[in-house]
Amino acid sequence: MYKKRNRKTLRLIGYFASVMMLIFNLSAASFTPVAEAAAGQTLTMDKLQYLKGEAITLSYTGAGANGADWVGIYKAGDVPPNSGVSLRWDYIKSGDGKVSLSNGLDPGTYDALFMLNGGYEIVDRKTFKVVEQIEHVPVDGVTLDQQNVTMTEGETVTLTATVTPANANDTKVSWTSSDPAVVSVTAAGGSASLTGNSPGTATVTAVTYDGNFTSSANVTVVADLTLQNIIENAQAKYDAAVEGNEDGQYVAGSKAQLQSAIDAARATANDSNATPEQVNQAKAALKAAIQLFDKQKISADLNGDGRISIGDLAIVAGSYGKQPDQADWNEKADVNHDGKVDVIDLQIVAKATLQ
């Protein structure tokens, strides 16, 4: 018994050690303090690489009415005012808009900072490079937001591909269906609209133009179900689901959302005066709730290779500290779907690699 406990203890020690080592090896810039942004205060770069001498264009939202909010360019990781004066700067007009800064910067890595009221309260930070010539950033993978899709005849579902890294030069993908008679695909950039044509199964695949990386989803098309059938399927999914912070579980609160949608659909199903239009609306709403619920499932297999390994852990580590409004945001790395990549995401994946 003591040997078993010792082995378990060693595994836990190794697990926490690996997580902490990853955290301390992350870029220092990831830990640069940034104030909690007020609603809508964001900064966006029009690109992540600029040729030396090329104007730097920034889009912003939520600037204050006093006209004293400003943007400044600093060396990557610098925190004003301790880091000294900005290399380039300008005030920004209230509301949303764009500002263009001259670029006489030497080649290197820089941060664009959104700061408030003429001071140094940072509400957003974006990192970019100045280069002598545009660097080729190759694609290293692609993932889909769903690996298993169930839909009914005539239904349309959206499938979205995420190409990594986000700053790759060519993030375009092509889409194919293994059986268009079952499910057809209409591509729209990084997303595809799937239409269920007849009952059966098919595989929908996204392929990157750069590198020919692929990711696929298994699609099942079933005959149009009654509202009661959909309710029963949703209730079974709810009953089998477990909320928590481990691989295969669902994020906290997701079951309550699904149950609320089930209850609303059941009310319509039990209403003898419900019109066909109301029934169809209830079916569509419950299907959408099921699809949202499926996206709330925690999966530590980030690269979609069917196993959980150090490669998945590296994806989280590479996105540590990132949030959705940043250019290099990787939604897959936000394992627990809470809008940020932090130590909890690292812990979930690290623990899953030990199982």
Image (cartoon, helix red, strand yellow):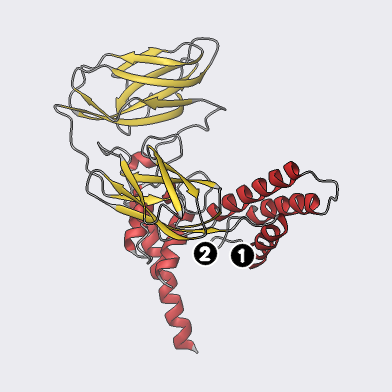
Q: Quadrant of residue 216?
A: bottom left
Find disc 1 in the rendering and name its residue: 242
Residue 85 visible in the picture: no
The image position of residue 70, as x and y in percent, is: 43, 16
Residue 24 visible in the picture: yes
SS assignment at label 2: loop
Do the CB atoms of the residues marked 2 and 1 lie less than 8 Å apart?
Answer: yes
Find disc 2 in the rendering and name its residue: 248
Query: Looking at the image, which residue is at 53% across and 52% down?
Result: 295
Kindly give the residue lying farthest to the left in the view shown.
132
The image position of residue 102, as x and y in percent, is: 26, 14
Of residues 19 and 152, which is closer to you in this image?
152
The image position of residue 249, as x and y in percent, is: 56, 62
Could you classify mark 2 by the number of other residues whose Cα lies within 10 Å: few (under 14), some (14-19), or many (20 or more)?
Answer: some
Quadrant of the snapshot with the C terminus: bottom left
Q: As drawn, is 346 to the left or to the right of 49?
A: right
The image position of residue 89, as x and y in percent, is: 34, 15
SS assignment at label 1: loop
Of residues 25 and 254, which is closer to you in this image?
254
Query: Looking at the image, which residue is at 38% across and 65% down?
Result: 308
Could you classify mark 1 by the number of other residues whose Cα lies within 10 Å: few (under 14), some (14-19), or many (20 or more)?
Answer: some
Q: As drawn, is 288 to the left or to the right of 146?
A: right
Q: As drawn, is 240 to the left or to the right of 63?
A: right
Of residues 276 and 58, which is closer to you in this image?
276
Identity, as a three-letter code, of the amino acid under mark 1: Val
Query: Disc 2 and disc 1: Cα gap in Å?
Result: 8 Å
Kindly give the residue lying farthest to the bottom in the view shown.
1
Identity, as a three-letter code, of the amino acid under mark 2: Gly
Q: Earlier in the sequence, mark 2 or mark 1?
A: 1
Query: Looking at the image, which residue is at 49% across and 63% down?
Result: 247
